[in-house]
């Protein structure tokens, strides 16, 4: 298999999606809110919208989960900027995350970039108008914890008031999906009225005892997609613990390592996915020596697997 063939297989693997309990919970809650909003629209009822806060550490898979949900929901209209209707508008919070700059980004995502400089108040008034015009049901802000970074108490309250005003709008309330790091919880808890409008869903860290079967099924899922057979050693508790530690306990990083290991196996034209493929994948990713590789070291739990070049224990 040449490099082009491997690259093609890897593209297909990265597009594959292994579900997990947190994603299933997110999917159910989103569908509930979506159906409730559509029922209210059909009945001519305008009521306050609700939101979902999807919280997880870096590498947990939260952004992938949102993208997967939006793409796989066949009844959602994710229109381009030239389409009249757009059920969900999604964008990452820009830097700097000032209320004005975020509003400008929202307008651009709605297909209405600003021609002249305006105040934050006017910009968000325009955002509300265009959300209504495009019949938008949900606004998704990724890396939403940045909304609370380096804000004065007054600025923080302005952010909170803006989010609440979108959900409480009397002519067109818009639901919110906020995905972000654990610091997002602090922003939501800053105002009890904001917190009660959100359903929190958190990506927990993988546990080397409770999540072994999930790790095994994920390895088998991606190996099957690549027409590989997992070696017996990959389906042992010790290996699952090493993989979880190498991925810093994050589900998204676990998948990244599995896919990277599969790439090593495909490049050597193997039919079996083996532990050495994971060892090589981690070495390439971190630049570490074997003594600081969780797939090699006996005392692997002492290793800080998030650091490059073995930079710390």
Image: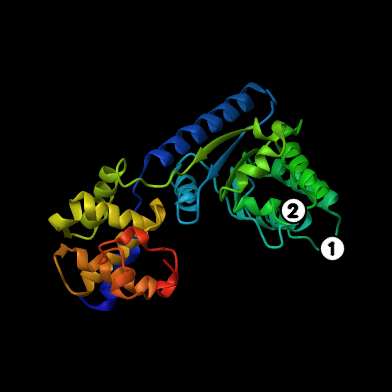
Q: List the residue tagged with mark 1.
A: 116
Residue 253 in the image: above or below residue 52: below
Give whichever of 172, 275 is nearer the camera: 275
Q: List the residue tagged with mark 2.
A: 103
Identify the secondary structure beneath mark 2: helix
- Spot the residue most to the bottom: 2
Quadrant where the C terminus sits is: bottom left
Residue at 55% over, 48% down: 78
Q: Left or right of 43: which side holds 129?
A: right
Residue at 46% over, 42% down: 73
Rendered image: mark on residue 278 = none
Q: Left or right of 105: which side holds 118?
A: right
Give whichever of 90, 246 is nearer the camera: 246
Q: Quadrant of residue 81?
A: bottom right
Residue at 26% over, 64% down: 295
Q: Is residue 15 visible?
A: no
Q: Is residue 35 visible?
A: yes
Question: Of the residues under marks 1 and 2, which one precedes in the sequence?
Answer: 2
Residue 98 in the image: above or below residue 268: above
Give whichever of 164, 150 is nearer the camera: 150
Is there CB contact under 8 Å for labels 1 and 2?
no
Return the x and y of residue 133 as percentages of the image width and height: 71, 43
Q: For the residues carrying marks 1 and 2, which lies nearer the camera in this image?
A: 2
Return the x and y of residue 40 as percentages of the image width and height: 62, 25
Return the x and y of residue 259 as percentages of the image width and height: 31, 62
Quadrant where the N terminus sits is: bottom left
């Amino acid at each position: 298999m040449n490099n082009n063939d491997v690259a093609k297989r890897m593209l297909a693997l990265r597009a594959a999606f292994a579900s997990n309990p947190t994603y299933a919970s997110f999917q159910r809650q989103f569908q509930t809110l979506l159906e409730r909003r559509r029922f209210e629209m059909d009945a001519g009822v305008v009521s306050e919208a609700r939101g979902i806060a999807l919280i997880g550490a870096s590498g947990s898979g939260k952004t992938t989960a949102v993208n997967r949900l939006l793409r796989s929901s066949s009844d959602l209209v994710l229109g381009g900027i030239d389409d009249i209707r757009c059920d969900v508008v999604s964008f990452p919070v820009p830097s700097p995350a000032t209320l004005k700059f975020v509003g400008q980004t929202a307008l651009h995502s709605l297909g209405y970039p600003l021609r002249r400089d305006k105040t934050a108040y006017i910009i968000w008034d325009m955002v509300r108008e265009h959300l209504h015009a495009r019949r938008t049901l949900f606004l998704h802000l990724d890396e939403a914890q940045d909304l609370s970074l380096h804000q004065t108490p007054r600025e923080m309250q302005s952010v909170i008031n803006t989010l609440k005003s979108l959900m409480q709008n009397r002519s067109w309330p818009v639901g919110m999906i906020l995905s972000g790091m654990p610091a997002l919880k602090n922003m939501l808890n800053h105002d009890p009225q904001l917190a009660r409008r959100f359903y929190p869903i958190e990506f927990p860290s993988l546990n080397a005892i409770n999540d072994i079967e999930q790790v095994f099924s994920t390895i088998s899922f991606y190996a099957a997609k690549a027409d590989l057979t997992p070696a017996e050693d990959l389906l042992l508790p010790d290996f699952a613990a090493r993989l979880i530690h190498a991925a810093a306990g994050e589900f998204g990083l676990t998948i990244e390592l599995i896919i990277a290991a599969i790439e090593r196996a495909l490049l050597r034209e193997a039919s079996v996915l083996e532990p050495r493929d994971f060892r090589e994948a981690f070495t390439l990713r971190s630049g570490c020596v074997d003594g600081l590789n969780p797939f090699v070291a006996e005392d692997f739990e002492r290793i800080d697997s998030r650091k490059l070049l073995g930079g710390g224990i």
